[in-house]
Amino acid sequence: MTKTNLITGFLGSGKTTTIRHLLANKPENERWAVLVNEFGEIGIDGALLADSGAVLKEIPGGCMCCVNGLPMQVGLNMLLQQSKPDRLLIEPTGLGHPKQILSLLTQETYGGWIDLRATLCLLDPRQLSDARYRENENFRDQLAAADIIIANKSDTWQPQDVEALQAWQTQFAGERPLLSIEHGRLAVELLDRPRTNSTALPDAQHHHTHGKSQGLAALRLPENSRWRRALNQGQGYTACGWIFDGDTEFDTIGMMEWVRLAPVDRAKAVVRINEGTLLVNRQGQDFSIETRPGAPLDSRIELIHSADADWNALQSDLFKIRLS
């Protein structure tokens, strides 16, 4: 049986960074797999996890939390039957509802395949002071469904964030563990904690749209196309993403500034630059940069905003920093 953990958390809570840390510290003799879902269609998280050594399956466009759950079932079955991992980490979109996923994982069908362990929810306590997060149904239900709450980004907290976290813990955490970490540095041993939470969650709602072709992999470019743009909307959020071919190169400083200044809530990019690969991740004012040797197979960029944005203007500025 495959030990399985659901790792949830709202947009910008640090799920992918945490999973990268876990994969970097997994037992050497174990084979791990990741089933990752994103709100957008482009598939940035898959690119971020591509060199992790884990078996990876992507479900773009928010499909994991759909009522019928078909894309998730197909992806889950493929991983379990073909890869036979020792452990499976499931990362839903930050806008996803956990009930549908937990309901599927606990079906009798998977009784001989899955050993479901603790569900972990990543939380950025700074979001507790923002009504957009506090009043979001999925934000609340992700926390309610967790066996363990992981308060992430402790290096960024202000006194008011600590107070907000303590108030939330007193009112909502109950007996569940609440741990503080920074930069996603989570102990691997926590994954073996058992499921203890029996909170009854409301039914998941299907609040997002899909492109014409709903599948199990992130977008690819049509033949002879150099770039493509894709949009996805739901729950008051819009994702706009771009994919460029492997020959397209971006100006390093220009890309960092474009991501930093984009008037959106969330921005992620994995792009080709002269030095190799540039990874940029921004949530609000939090901004991280990483470079890697070697060029990526293609360049992927995604922006998410809680309102519509002038995507054409942003695209025009993006093309100005394209070198080839």
Image: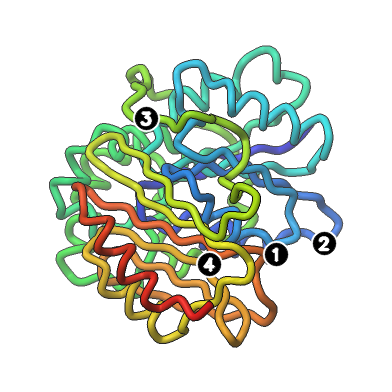
Q: Quadrant of residue 152?
A: bottom left
Residue at 68% across, 42% down: 88
Of residues 84 and 201, the one drawn nearer to the viewer in this rendering: 84
Q: Residue at x 42, y 75 (%)?
A: 288
Gap between marks 2 and 1, in whole Å?
15 Å
Q: Is residue 206 above or below residue 55?
A: above
Tell me the amino acid under the disc marked 2.
Glu
Which residue in the structure is indicated by mark 2? 28
Q: Secondary structure at mark 3?
A: loop
Judge by depth and name the residue closer to the eye, 15 or 169: 15
The picture places residue 254, in percent across and down from the top left corner, at 38, 82
What residue did someone put label 4 on?
A: 270
Residue depicted at 30% across the width and 73% down the height: 156
Residues packed near mark 4 inside 10 Å, few (<14), some (14 to 19) or many (20 plus): many
Report the residue marked by disc 3: 209
Name which of mark 3 and mark 2 comes first in the sequence. 2
The reply to whether discs 3 and 4 touch (Cβ–Cβ < 8 Å) is: no
Q: Name the amino acid, label 4.
A: Val
The furthest residue to the front:
224
Q: Is residue 9 left or right of residue 102?
A: left
Mark 3–mark 2 distance (CA, rounded to whole Å): 40 Å
Q: Residue furthest right?
A: 29
Front residue of this view, candidates 278 and 88? 278
* Residues tagged 3 and 1 counted as in contact (Cβ below 8 A): no
Residue 321 vertical position relative to residue 94 in the rendered view, above or below: below
- Left or right: 181 with respect to 128? right
Q: Give the residue at x 30% y 40%.
A: 139
Q: Using the numbered discs, state the Cα–Cα distance from disc 3 to disc 1 in whole angstroms.
A: 30 Å
